[in-house]
Image (cartoon, rainbow, N blue to C red):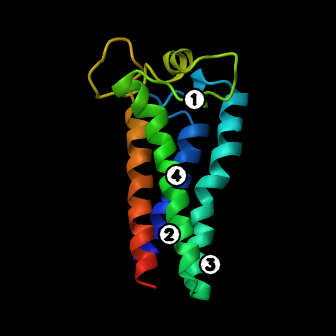
């Protein structure tokens, strides 16, 4: 389970980096985001997303389960943040205050410029921004990583 958890954590980080920096239209729309926005997203999110791998590896190497549980907690916070950012506006029409890295643009504006023309399978709910497939895959990877991280830690 440890190998699976580490693989999922690192796969989520790699997937995040590729989909943030490489144009894979229609899965993503990197060309619709400013370079500064993409780099800010990587700078803020990649270290946080990679931290659980380091914590879990430390937990296994030094037989310190609290590090593994900390890894699972961080992974859970990452997935919670992603779900709040994407699903709360879609399901409830509420945007979290940290939705954009710039005070110059709203979440709805950023979504319409960068995500609205990507691959989306969810039905419209009024004019609310909809999660795209790119982020649905990312959220599934992170959620699976969190579950496996807790399971791997319990087995230490």
State the residue at coordinates (61%, 31%).
98
Q: Which residue is mark 2?
A: 6
- Apparent side of residue 51 relative to residue 85 in the rendered image (left or right): right
Distance between the alpha carbons at the discs numbered 3 and 2: 11 Å
Q: Which residue is mark 3?
A: 58
**Residue 12 drawn above or below residue 82:** below
Distance between the alpha carbons at the discs numbered 2 and 4: 17 Å
- Apparent side of residue 36 relative to residue 18 in the rendered image (left or right): right
- Apparent side of residue 133 relative to residue 38 in the rendered image (left or right): left
Distance between the alpha carbons at the discs numbered 1 and 3: 32 Å
Asked which quadrant contains residue 93, the reply is: top left
State the residue at coordinates (43%, 76%).
152
Badge count: 4
Q: Which residue is mark 1?
A: 99
Distance between the alpha carbons at the discs numbered 4 and 3: 19 Å
Q: Residue furthest left?
A: 123
> In front of the other: label 4 or label 3?
4
């Amino acid at each position: 389970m440890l190998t699976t958890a580490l693989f999922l954590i690192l796969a989520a980080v790699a997937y995040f980096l590729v989909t943030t920096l490489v144009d894979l239209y229609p899965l993503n729309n990197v060309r619709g985001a400013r370079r500064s926005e993409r780099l800010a997203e990587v700078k803020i999110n990649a270290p946080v997303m990679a931290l659980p791998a380091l914590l879990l590896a430390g937990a296994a190497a030094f037989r310190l389960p609290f590090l593994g549980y900390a890894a699972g907690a961080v992974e859970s916070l990452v997935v919670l943040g992603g779900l709040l950012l994407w699903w709360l506006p879609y399901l409830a029409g509420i945007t979290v205050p940290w939705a954009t890295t710039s005070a110059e643009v709203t979440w709805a504006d950023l979504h319409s410029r960068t995500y609205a023309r990507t691959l989306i399978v969810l039905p419209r709910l009024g004019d609310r921004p909809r999660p795209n497939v790119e982020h649905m895959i990312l959220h599934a990877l992170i959620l699976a990583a969190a579950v496996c991280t807790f399971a791997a830690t319990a087995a230490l």
